Image (cartoon, grey):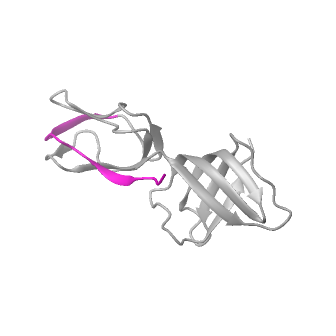
Amino acid sequence: MRSRSYKLLTSTKGRINDVFFQAGQQVRKGDILVKFADQSFLVAPAHGIVTQRLVETGEYLQGGVAVASFVELSSVRLQLATDNHASALHPGQLVQVQSRDQPNQGMTASVVASTLEDELLTLDLRLRTSSPEPLEAGTPIQVHALQF
């Protein structure tokens, strides 16, 4: 399954009374993100991560304006060539996947499943956080297991 990244748009016009999220925050489907002066709301359309905040409290918006950049939480599968000394990661373990060229571009995910076969490590991951700029296909990456 691929992650979907898109802009959250207002369906109404009006002044923003409250913004209930920060950039990088994980939200659940139905969480209130923005409250307008007319008591209408913008809610999270799915479980995801708000990667960019594009509005401020007190701002007046027309309908159809982008409020935030949003990445739906989904599964990610990585297949990595390894050496004979690599070991599979354990379910529940957190990993950081980042661009080799731009280390601030990447994601944090938890391992759902991991197999190592013939020097090929396959990771099934559940996305937890993402940088504002998603990784593009073909980006050289590095994977680090996070210790807590």
On the image, the x and y values in percent for residue 70 come to 38, 49
Q: How many marks?
A: 0
Can residue 139 be seen in this snapshot? yes
On the image, the x and y values in percent for residue 62 come to 13, 47
Q: Residue at x 53, y 48 (%)?
A: 75
Name of the residue lying farthest toward the front: 118
Q: Quadrant of the C terminus?
A: top right
Q: Is residue 125 in the magenta section?
A: no
Q: Is residue 81 rendered to the left or right of residue 12?
A: right
Name of the residue lying farthest toward the top: 39
Q: Residue at x 47, y 41 (%)?
A: 25
Can residue 54 be seen in this snapshot? no
Q: Is residue 24 rendered to the left or right of residue 91?
A: left
Of 59 and 130, nearer the camera is 130
Q: Is residue 15 in the magenta section?
A: yes
On the image, the x and y values in percent for residue 41 come to 24, 32
Q: Residue at x 53, y 62 (%)?
A: 105
Of 38 and 81, nearer the camera is 81
Magenta highlight range: 1-19
Residue 140 sits above or below residue 63 on the image: below
Residue 136 sits above or below residue 126 on the image: below
Of 10 and 55, nearer the camera is 10
Q: Residue at x 39, y 54 (%)?
A: 5
Name of the residue lying farthest toward the right: 85
Q: Is residue 46 rendered to the left or right of residue 95?
A: left
On the image, the x and y values in percent for residue 4 come to 40, 53
